[in-house]
Image (cartoon, rainbow, N blue to C red):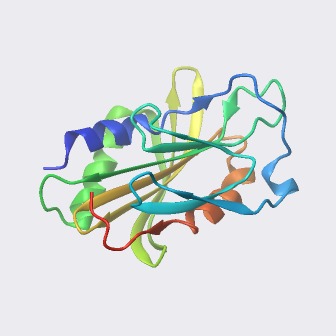
Amino acid sequence: MINRLLLIIAVFFTIPIIASERDAAVLPDEKQEELVQYQSEEGKFSIGFPESWEVIEGVMGRDMVALAPAVDPDDLFLENVNIIYAKLDAPITEEDYYKFNMQSLQKLLIDYDLEESSDVQLGGRDARKIVFTHTMGVVNAKVLQYLLLIDGQAYVLTFTADPLDFDEYLQQFERIANSFVINSGVTL
């Protein structure tokens, strides 16, 4: 079946990132920054992030995390993007992969509520887009997630925000997602 590590990571990468002390920044709709291209360490994908975002590799089982700057000094929730990818242990159809992930999220996340699920194109490839909310401790989160299954390799892009701020970040999240490119010929 699906690599168990992928399942564990897929569940925990929806965890919101709680801010430490950071510089204050403007809200995403106040400033349209150029995207700076990030190339994965193994060269498997590239994606662009606003230059004010901090990119960290290998955090909490994720391949990379990009953190938005704090909106003000008291901001305790950093909107973030993270990406995981893994080679699957056995062949699986796209539909079975999506169903498996949806069932796992529903079972493992507290107060999980699916708001949207649709088939989309991302970087010229078929993907499943889901939007959901969940609770982690006392923190509520709203998540936009893209799942891609390409040649036995799974890519999961997760965009997390405070539910009250999600709509303000949505356009920026989608802009970042649309910059995602899987590099051809690179296998895990």
Residue in the picture at 28% in, 44% down: 6
Residue 80, horizontal then vertical, whole percent: 61, 43
Residue drawn at 38 percent across, 54 percent down: 42
Query: How many callouts does the rendering have?
Result: 0
Q: Quadrant of the C terminus?
A: bottom left
Comparing 160 with 35, the one in front is 35
| Vertical position of residue 76 compared to residue 119: above or below | above
Residue furthest bottom in the image: 124
Residue 132 locus on image (x, y percent):
50, 47
Left or right of residue 148, residue 131 in this image:
right
Quadrant for residue 63, please give it.
top left
The answer to which quarter of the image holds residue 182 is bottom left
Which residue is depicted at the point 44% across and 37% down? 58
| Residue at 59% over, 26% down | 139
Q: Position of residue 61 (x, y in %)?
A: 39, 35
Q: Quick one: 150 or 102, which is closer to the camera?
A: 150
Q: Is residue 64 left or right of residue 125?
A: right
The percent coordinates of residue 47 (x first, y second) are 55, 61
Give above or below for 165 relative to 29. Answer: above
